[in-house]
Image: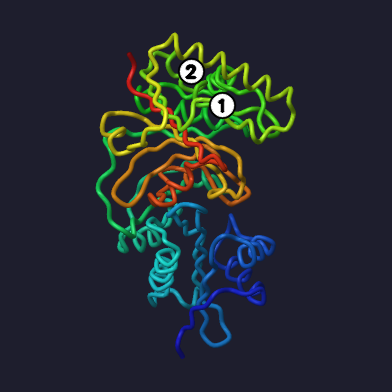
Amino acid sequence: MNTVFRLAVIEDLPALLQLEEQCFTTDRLNSRSFQWMISRANGQLLVAQRGEHLLGYALVLFHRGTSLARLYSIAIAAQARGNGLGKQLLDRTEAIALEHDCAYLRLEVRLDNPAAIALYERNGYRRFALIHDYYQDHADALRLEKRILQHRESRNIQVPYYPQTTDFTCGPACLLMAMGALQPGRLLERREELQIWREATTVFMTSGHGGCSPQGLALAAWRREFRVRLQLSKAGPLFLDGVRDEHKKDVMRLVHEEFTAQLLASDVVCEIGGPLDLAQLLEHGGQPLVLISSYRLTRSKSPHWVIVTDCDEEFVYLHDPDVDHSQHRQAMDCQHLPVSHGKFEKMCSFGRDKLRAAVIVYGQK
């Protein structure tokens, strides 16, 4: 009897839970998780069935707005092991990822599971991180990755990752990462994250705390003795259209005017309207912080800062400081995200005015 591969349906829940019970002693998916994965997740749950029996499954999640997929879980029934089903599920998962325009597939595997590690490495996965205390029983995990579409080796400069610790400090988190890349060994601390926010905030935003303006971030980097270039599509205060309260608008204008005066007294290079040539900026040692619309990542229309870590002919690679746990994302899922040039162009054009802003940080003066 042939094995049939298909997408899971709600009626598979009892068999999926039985597989989970049989294959894992910790970190099991429960009924609610499976229901979410089947009906709501930005991903696909593939099952292997022979006759009436479910022999295995593979769950792949897609990172919205990027070309990254994650093999979240794979399970094989005891009676089906040793017959190549794991490789078949893996191959089909990669095919699904390709169909969704993904360039990378990433996964975690227990360090004490040599059989699974061997399967992945035979199929072209490479180790790129060790995560201590990853599982519920405190076991370590290996992080593996496969590039489905080949590309050149990454830059010599390694950009460390720092997740923002508040909803409004994406800009400071990106600046910490840029400074850490340019000054290896520099401590990336929450105290400085919040201090940068205090220096660079616009005070108000459409709602809640204000984020950081490009002028404010440029000044914060300059005060820390880094060389800075500021590229904008317009010089005036940003995001006023999204604020209804006139008092708040007045405050934002005053903050902008003060930032502008301080920039004139600095040696920050300011350019209005020029193209953002990422390849050239990276080649000359720059670390670009780019303002994007987070809609293509999270379906939220708020402005958001990311840092570009690399680019090649096909993709721009980003560190996204926002770890959205509600999307089953972890910090490792937010690093070196591959985004096609076309999608990136749309991302970094914000709002009706097609606002573009970038802060490029170079080595210390």
The residue type indicated by label 1 comes to Cys
Quarter occupied by residue 363: top left
Can you say whether 87 is above or below 155 in the image?
below
Question: Is label 1 in contact with label 2 (beta carbons under 8 Å)?
Answer: yes
Can you say whether 81 is above or below 342 in the image?
below
Q: Nearer the viewer, residue 110 or 364?
A: 364
Tell me the distance, in whole angstroms, between the alpha carbons under discs 1 and 2: 10 Å
The number of callouts visible is 2
Q: To which residue does mark 2 refer?
A: 220
Disc with the residue nearer the chain's start (1 vs 2): 1
Q: Residue at x 55, y 74 (%)?
A: 7
Query: What crowding class fits label 2: few (fewer than 14 Cα within 10 Å), some (14-19), or many (20 or more)?
Result: many
Q: To which residue does mark 1 refer?
A: 212
Q: Residue at x 55, y 20 (%)?
A: 200
Left or right side of 106 for 158: left
Query: What crowding class fits label 1: few (fewer than 14 Cα within 10 Å), some (14-19), or many (20 or more)?
Result: many
Residue 242 image label: none
The residue type indicated by label 2 comes to Ala
Q: Position of residue 69 (x, y in %)?
A: 46, 57
Can you say whether 129 is above or below 177 in the image?
below
